[in-house]
Amino acid sequence: MLAQIATPDGPKLQEVDDPQPKPGQALVRIHAAALNRADLFMATGGSHGPAGGVGAVMGLEFAGERVDTGERVMGTHGASYAQYAAVDEGRLIPIPDGMSYEQAACLPVGLNTMHNAVVTNGGLGPGQAILIHGASSGVGLMGLQIAKLMGAGVVIGSSGDAGRRGRLKDFGADLAVDYKDSDWVEQVRAVTGGEGVDVVVDQISGPDFNRTMKATKVLGRIVNVGRLGGQTGEVDFNLHALKRITFIGVTFRTRSKAEVSDVVAKMRADLWAPMAQGKISLPIDQVFAFEALPDALARMSENRHFGKIVLKVS
């Protein structure tokens, strides 16, 4: 089969052996796959948990059909830039009728990541307020929609790009703030009656973390999903203690097969029906041919896209 392989010089499309499913796996013919930011460093051999490395098949999410049953499925898989993949059964999500493979390929990472962050770890309850940092990313846009579906009272999204920030309300944001502004904390507190938000899903982290705590109410929760603003920063431990904030770290990179299956099952229980009804979707920024992965990665590295970048595999 053809697959996009990571090399020190970037991705290379080449012939590799077809994957052989192990017990508990299904062989999937992949029709479309979506890019994620991790692909930028994985393209030259970087690792993302157990996935990646020089010589490894790239890709993290896909849509296709099971070879054994013909069922249309999507899911996450650490080698999805290929014509075929052997995928753990617990990762598979049925594709709703009428949804294209390109549309479906955009959803699995966002669905799993944000349901786990907003609902399971964030504990968002009806009427509560939530802030999603980095909300103009595909995962962030998914988080806004999930929060609204879960009955959030106030949904706030942050983005450092004015054009993309202006589109956040189309995906459920009641307020869009620029985390580069000096007064964004005051804007958040104003719309939450001066208390701050109950939940933050933080994809920025870095040096802005103390201001994020200031925007969080007493007994609030901050879920550490990403570190686009930096992996380190100063922490005001006194502020953390005074507000009694619960700080939760999440990642799929250290989860077991059973843990991932549990995440997917909980997500499907809450979100599959709304997704099938068209209440959850992500915009497609651009579709590239399978062999044009370097061009797709260049598009992502420009950081000017809105929504997901997709590869049409077959």
Image (spheres, rainbow, N blue to C red):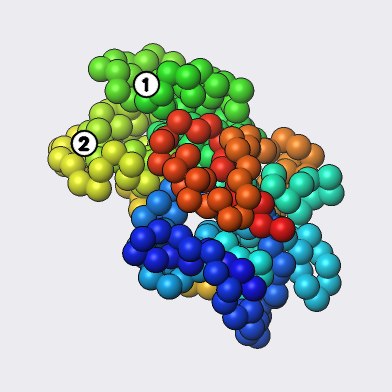
Does 65 appear above or below 207?
below
Determine the image quadrant of residue 24.
bottom right
Residue at 29% over, 38% down: 229
What residue would you read off at disc 1?
178
Q: Amino acid at mark 2?
A: Pro
Image quadrant where one finds the C terminus:
bottom right
Q: CA distance from mark 1 to mark 2?
A: 15 Å
Q: Amino acid at mark 1?
A: Asp
Q: Which numbered dot is residue 189?
A: none
Residue at 25% over, 33% down: 208
Residue 155 percent across, percent down from the top left: 51, 27
Label 1 vs 2, first from the N-terminus: 1
Q: Which numbered dot is residue 207?
A: 2
* Residue 73 relative to residue 77: left or right: right
| Residue closest to the eye, 261 or 85 | 85
* Residue 114 relative to residue 45: left or right: right
